[in-house]
Image (tube, grey):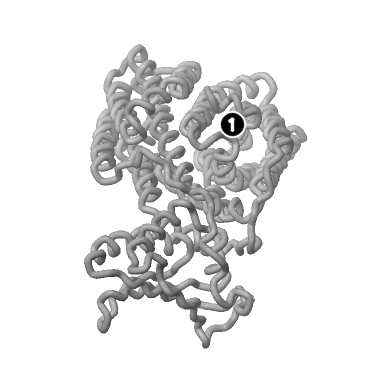
Amino acid sequence: MEPLRSRTFRWLWIAQFASNTGTWAQTVGAQWLMGDLGGGPLLVALVQTATSLPIFLLVLPAGALGDIFDRRRLLLGAQGLMLAGAGGLALITSAGRMTPELLLVLIALVGAGQALALPSFQAVQPELVPRALLPQATLLNGATFNVARAVGPALGGVLIATAGPAATFGLNAVSFLGVIAVVAAWRRPEDQRTLGAEHVRSALIAGARYVASAPRFRRILGRNALFVLPASALWALLPVLARGPLGLGSGGYGLLFGSVGLGALAGAFVLTRLRARIGPSGLVAVATSSYALALLVIGLSGSVAATVPALVVAGLSWVGVLSTLNAAAQQILPDWTRARSLAFYTLVFMGGQALGSILWGLVAARAGLDAAWAIAAVLLVLGGVVGVRLLALADSPLEVGRVQFGADPEGAGDAPHGAGPVLVTAEWRVARHDAAAFLAAMEPVGRSRRRTGAQRWGLFRDVADPEVYVETFTVATWGEHLRQHLERGTLGDQEHDARARALTVDGMGPRVRHALWPYGREEP
């Protein structure tokens, strides 16, 4: 695989596999220890909640931090936080001082570190491999996660039996050292921020505004949700299937998980050629259909011999869909908002899994296990049809290289960065025979303005002079408007602007004016 030729990506990939394996082993150890401490079913279930809840609460702020601060240092801090949590679990458990409450707190600390790391880890992938290799890189990352998901619990079970739960915590703590070593050795170029770092609150708002005004990224989020919600039936119902109709013990359950991991690993090597032939939309459609068929076989066959190969197909299809969507997201996101936008992607993914687990548990309890598998498969097919018809993925990435939109706007040296809001007006003179083409060209320009910071945008035609069009938009502060000019523009935005400018009478573009709200309080 081409991405593995990159030294930093290769070593980080290996270190992440070890870290993911340690994390899954720790989950098994924590659940087992909670039972040893006298915890009932609720407390045992809260172990998973303690892991996932910090991610729900912190992933969006973590995405903003990944765009504000140096991602390498943020990754090191997040790994250090997880190391502290896992090390604390190992030491306190070994000393015999662990309590259920303390166990949940330390698990939540590790979860907080995961929340901080996830958006930045995804956002640095385009810095480690060429953009054309991102689909292969995400396939490899997805494969390591799913293989670790199979290997980690089995390894955790062996460690619990031979050395006790503390050994699983110690393994996880040691696994973070590899990631820390690789990230510390990585010589990442310094971020170029003309205007300095953003405030977290404004960065979050800017990220949400970008997502709301980026149709291609919203389509990816939609495909993510349509797949993950029904596809999560596999993870929710597989334990019930193993204990019930298949009558398997812990060893057999490990075989089922291992089959999913084997399929995910195979996908990293098989799906690259298929994607090159049928494109990302075609691959998502085929993998979704294959996953639906696998669910039907898994749920209705009642046979281990049929279930194991179906799980291999499910693992391959799972990583095929999600790695393709993740790569598509990374290819269209500019650097200034990549981490915070990918945080929205993570939130949709994890929310879909969490809601799906509850949904399929309820369906299985009310309608039966067989019906739950069948309904999930049908919803996958329906979601795939909706996705192909309404949420088609583009086969080519956007031009997201950073550019500056001309010089600083007039008055840039006089207005405080916190002053605002700002009203920007631009008068465009367009010949009547070019009016229709101009209106069409301004639609992507309007989305560009909103993506980069505009709160409201409009285009109006002058009643007295029909050849004059007045574009207006507002920005929260003068500093935010400067970021539009100096930090957030992309080659794609520049192309949209150039098409509109080419349709003006003199080809020179609009006459622009800036005005500040005179009654507002200037922010620091």
Please identify the quadrant where the C terminus is shown: bottom right
Between residue 355 and residue 205, name the one nearer to us: 205
Task: Residue 319: tell me if it is visible.
Answer: yes
How many marks are shown on the rendered structure? 1
Q: Can you say whether 309 is above or below 402 in the image?
A: above
Residue 394 image offset from top left, x and y in percent: 35, 41
Q: Quadrant of residue 483?
A: bottom right
Residue type, numbered disc 1: Asn
Residue toward you, 99 or 202:
202
Residue ID for mark 1: 20
Which element carries disc 1, helix, strand or loop?
Answer: helix
Residue shown at 46%/42% (left/top)? 331
Query: Most extreme residue toward the front, as rendered?
Result: 506
Image vertical order of residue 25 relative to residue 470, above or below: above
Label 1: few (<14), some or many (≥20) within 10 Å? many
Q: Where is residue 70 drawn, in percent x and y?
A: 66, 50
State the residue in front, 494 or 104. Answer: 494
Direction from residue 199 to residue 454 in the image, left or right: left
Observer able to see residue 47: no
Q: Quadrant of residue 10?
A: top right
Among all residues in the image, which is located at the extreme bottom? 519
Residue 407: give x, y in percent of width and height.
Answer: 56, 66
Q: Is residue 116 left or right of residue 331?
A: right
Percent from the top left, x then y, of residue 468?
31, 75
- Picture quadrant where residue 230 is located: top left
Q: Residue at x 37, y 68 (%)?
A: 506
Q: Give above or below for 190 relative to 377.
A: below
Q: Residue at x 38, y 65 (%)?
A: 507
